Image: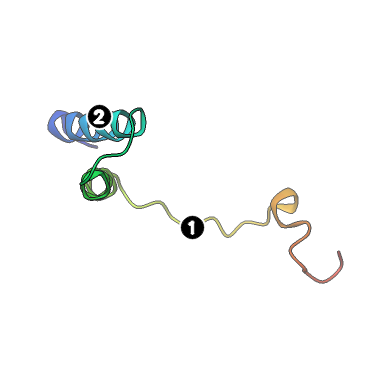
Amino acid sequence: MRTAEENAAVSLALGRILRLASRPSRPGDGEEYERCRSVILDTLAPVAPDYATNYARDRMKGAQGD
């Protein structure tokens, strides 16, 4: 479970990223984006990779039997 402070940090970082995307690019935007992105990724729990077979996703990937 995340705390209220962590939820607020993620919300603010996401809002900042959306504000950066809504206007023309300025110097330093790349660094600001990466800083906000790292706040979000560091706060949220890592997601386990999905190794289950997904036939719709893997249909034309060159697997045997296609």
- Which image quadrant for residue 62? bottom right
Report the residue at 27% width, 43% height from top.
40
> Where's the C terminus, which quadrant?
bottom right
| Residue 51, position as x, y percentages in the image | 58, 60
Q: Which mark is residue 49?
A: 1
Q: Which mark is residue 11?
A: 2
Report the residue at 27% width, 28% height from top.
15
Q: Amino acid at mark 2?
A: Ser
> Where's the N terminus, which quadrant?
top left
| Residue 19, position as x, y percentages in the image | 29, 28
Considering only order in the chain, which callout, 1 or 2, is on the residue closer to the N terminus? Answer: 2
In this rendering, position of residue 18 left or right of residue 60: left
Q: Amino acid at mark 1?
A: Pro
Is residue 34 shown above or below 64?
Answer: above
In this rendering, position of residue 56 left or right of residue 19: right
- Which image quadrant for residue 2? top left
Report the residue at 74% width, 63% height from top.
61
In this rendering, position of residue 4 left or right of residue 56: left
Looking at the picture, tell me which residue is in the foreground, 63 or 2.
63
| Residue 64, position as x, y percentages in the image | 82, 71
